[in-house]
């Protein structure tokens, strides 16, 4: 199976000798990463336990292998200080006992990113993932495994946008996804969502999406008219003779973080009290050996939920894109719950093996496996599907727009370099003093010197509300926006966080105190030229992705495309990241 | 026989409720002063005078942590207390904090659902009046401008 690995190691060795691998250890100077994969048998998991749950999440429609730089800033405070998922770089390696300069260090951290990326290659891709899934199911026993997808699957690429998520529904059907829940799925029109779910061969679950009462009254479709559930809340599966309950939990704040206009009839929320009642009813009626929550809450919310709700054995989590190598055990009133988070962009596959005794979970083994495309042979049927599906769009996708003057990435609490390019593009093309761009956590990375294609730009921007705007805002209004988003990120109570990162800025800087009270975190706002921003004065501000109503301007990818074509090679002189206070010694920062 | 759908049943029920409502609902005599008070403590005082207030586990307030729409925030209050005379909802940081007050008859079940308007992030306070005391519980409801998620 691993012909590519052997071939690759051989090629790398030859290339290194010839001095062809830039920055590699053997040609001397600057790289710290070793030039081969250290764990030979990364995918050879022993058969252990009674059932196996395979978990993927937040792939954001990345069908091909990608580079995706993990964050260098992911701050946690109060109870989250110094704990997963708020550990980055060396702190993460230390916590989870991972060797520095290894392929695992590359998958889980941003350390020495570009050099390591050259050595270990891209991660993910559905054809490679399919090979891994088939191997893990086949060896363990197909009747004993379940493949669960935490959602954010139908959005994030040009082809997903053009096919309204259907390219991903087909890919998931080929992959063999059994159960899914959602978040960005809800950014298509509701009728489209229902159509896609119909085409999906697995089950779409969400206990926390309800049809609003007046919509029910007007005849809106519901899974259960009496309870108001818009979708099936849970499913029972028998694996190897053991009954397993899987409850779906969609992203609780979808109608707040994303436009309500696509899904006017549905109301969300965490609804942990209702989860508790549901778990109790499942436990008494269905007598399951295990209760699993397939969650799109985000890890901080899941950790809190696990401490408040009892009776759930495992929460397989997503949304916050945290690649956490181990399961976190959380104590609650009647026992403990395991909480995982399986990263993003198709980089990882979580493997949770459970052992039962007396009809209950007695023990577990968890691994979050990085999907190294150089170690896994692409599965031919999936590969062909992806190639054929992309064919009509190839010209558009491969349109060259410019060259990356440095590593382009997004993920992190504050402006990544790709965000800076987007913000600079908005200011330049729209002739604005200040620009705003959302703190999404998806968006793939482009290496220094690589051609930036339209596909790369779409991977960073492709949403169903991409329209841009220019409008006048007072300094006070700008501060209000920054304060609002900062509270969604740094509120001490995870239930009040939305799981995105800080809004990205162009043309202005500020000082941020994450420990400040709501409304008092932002200070010293100033323009790039050093002039303080006056709360009463009006500024010309450009932006995109408005959730309230549709903006009038061109889609953001056209604005960025135009800017890149003008720039040829894109550089960024400075990142408009805030000056932080109260973050010294925070292990959520490299 | 035709199957009775939930929707059809609800519709019929709502007509009944309207009919029943006309003679039966004991609207509290409109306390203009309480609804017009612009501070929480003042509004509570206008409504209830010096009635003692105690925090209580017997009052359950259901409200979203973050409102999906600040203009219509769904709030439910119920109580396991006996002899509940009224249920009131206050929004501390609204221009006029008293959002609603429902007077209950002797045979009423202490369980109400309302939609309230919230100007901004605020504490929402439920007061259940029973046996000459106000039983209180509260929760913060965040009103955000949204966007920028995940």
Image (cartoon, rainbow, N blue to C red):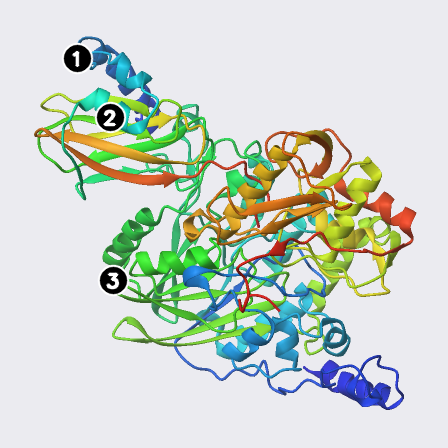
Residue denoted by label 2: B44
A423 is higher (above) or lower (below) than B112: below
Of labels 3 and 2, the one closer to you: 2
> In which quarter of the view is residue A320 placed?
bottom right
Q: Is residue A27 left or right of residue A79?
A: right
Q: Nearer the viewer, residue A362 or B74?
A: B74
> Residue A361: x percent and y percent?
32, 72
User: Residue A333: which numbered mark, if any?
Assistant: 3
The mark nearer the N terminus, 2 or 1, is: 1
Residue drawn at (41%, 45%) of the image? A208
Q: Chain of mark 1?
A: B
Return the chain for callout 3.
A
- Residue A89: x and y, percent? 60, 72
| Mark 1: few/some/many CA within 10 Å (<14, 14-19, 20+) | few
Q: Residue furthest top?
A: B23
Q: Nearer the viewer, residue A20 or A191?
A: A20
Q: Count the marks.
A: 3
Q: Which quarter of the figure is the C terminus of chain A placed in?
A: bottom right
Q: To which chain does the residue with label 2 belong?
A: B
Mark 1 = which residue?
Answer: B24
Residue lying at 10% horizontally and 24% vertically, measured from the top left: B107
- The residue drawn where x is 53% and y is 66% is A586
On whether disc 1 and disc 3 are found on a single subunit, the reply is no
């Amino acid at each position: 199976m691993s012909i590519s690995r052997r071939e690759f190691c051989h090629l790398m060795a030859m290339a290194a000798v010839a001095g062809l691998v830039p920055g590699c250890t053997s040609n001397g100077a600057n790289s710290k990463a070793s030039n081969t994969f250290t764990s030979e048998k990364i995918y050879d998991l022993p058969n252990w336990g009674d059932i196996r749950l395979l978990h993927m999440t937040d792939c954001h429609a990345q069908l091909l292998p990608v580079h995706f730089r993990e964050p260098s800033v992911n701050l946690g405070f109060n109870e989250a200080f110094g704990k997963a998922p708020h550990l980055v770089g060396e702190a993460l390696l230390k916590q989870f006992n991972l060797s520095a300069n290894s392929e695992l260090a590359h998958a889980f951290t941003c350390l020495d990113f570009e050099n390591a990326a050259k050595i270990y290659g891209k991660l993910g891709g559905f054809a490679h993932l399919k090979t891994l899934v088939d191997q893990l199911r086949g060896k363990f026993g197909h009747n004993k495994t379940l493949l669960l997808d935490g959602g954010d699957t139908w959005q994030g690429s040009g082809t997903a946008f053009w096919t309204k998520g259907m390219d991903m529904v087909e890919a998931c059907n080929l992959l063999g996804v059994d159960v899914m829940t959602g978040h960005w799925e809800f950014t298509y029109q509701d009728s489209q969502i229902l159509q896609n779910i119909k085409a999906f061969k697995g089950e779409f679950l969400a206990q926390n999406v309800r049809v609003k009462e007046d919509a029910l009254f007007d005849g809106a479709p519901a899974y259960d008219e009496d309870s108001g559930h818009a979708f099936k809340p849970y499913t029972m599966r028998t694996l190897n003779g053991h009954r397993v309950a899987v409850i779906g939990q969609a992203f609780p704040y979808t109608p707040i973080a994303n436009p309500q206009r696509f899904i006017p009839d549905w109301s969300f929320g965490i609804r942990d009290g209702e989860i508790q009642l549901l778990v109790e009813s499942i436990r008494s009626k269905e007598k399951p050996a295990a209760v699993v929550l397939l969650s799109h809450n985000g890890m901080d919310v899941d950790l809190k939920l696990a401490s408040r709700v009892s009776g759930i054995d495992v929460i397989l989590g997503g949304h916050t894109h945290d690649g956490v190598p181990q399961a976190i055990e959380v104590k609650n009133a009647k026992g403990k719950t395991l909480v995982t988070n399986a990263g993003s962009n198709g980089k990882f596959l979580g493997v949770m093996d459970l052992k039962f005794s007396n009809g209950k979970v007695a023990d577990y083994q968890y691994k979050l496996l990085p999907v190294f495309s150089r170690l896994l042979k692409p599965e031919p049927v999936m590969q062909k599907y992806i190639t054929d599906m992309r064919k009509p769009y190839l010209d558009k996708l491969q349109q060259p727009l410019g060259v990356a003057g440095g590593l382009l990435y997004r993920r992190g609490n504050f402006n990544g370099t790709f965000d800076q390019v987007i913000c600079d593009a908005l200011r330049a093309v729209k002739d604005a003093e200040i620009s705003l761009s959302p703190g999404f956590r998806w968006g793939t990375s482009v290496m220094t010197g690589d051609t930036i294609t339209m596909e790369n730009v779409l991977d960073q921007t492709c949403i169903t509300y991409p329209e841009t705007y220019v409008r006048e805002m007072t300094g006070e209004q700008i501060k209000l926006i920054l304060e609002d988003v900062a509270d969604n990120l740094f509120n001490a109570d995870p239930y009040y966080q939305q799981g995105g990162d800080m809004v990205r800025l162009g043309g202005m800087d500020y000082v941020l105190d994450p420990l400040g009270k709501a409304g008092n975190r932002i200070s010293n706002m100033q323009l790039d030229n050093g002039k303080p921003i006056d709360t009463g004065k009006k500024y010309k501000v450009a932006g995109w992705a408005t959730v309230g109503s549709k903006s009038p301007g061109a889609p953001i990818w056209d604005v960025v495309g135009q800017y890149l074509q003008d720039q040829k090679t894109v550089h960024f002189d400075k990142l408009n990241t805030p000056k932080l206070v109260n973050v010294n010694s925070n292990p959520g920062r490299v | 026989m035709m199957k009775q759908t939930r929707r059809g049943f609800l519709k019929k029920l709502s007509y009944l409720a309207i009919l029943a409502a006309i003679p039966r609902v004991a609207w509290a005599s409109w306390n203009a002063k309480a609804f017009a008070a612009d501070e929480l403590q003042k509004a509570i005082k206008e409504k209830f005078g010096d009635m003692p207030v105690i925090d209580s586990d017997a009052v359950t307030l259901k409200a979203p942590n973050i409102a999906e729409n600040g203009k219509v925030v769904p709030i439910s209050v119920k109580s396991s207390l006996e002899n509940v005379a009224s249920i009131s909802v206050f929004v501390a940081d609204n221009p006029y904090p008293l959002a609603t007050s429902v007077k209950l008859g002797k045979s009423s079940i202490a369980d109400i659902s309302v939609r309230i308007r919230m100007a901004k992030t605020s504490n929402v306070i439920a007061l259940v009046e029973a046996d000459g005391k106000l039983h209180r519980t509260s929760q913060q409801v965040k009103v955000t401008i949204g966007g920028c998620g995940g």
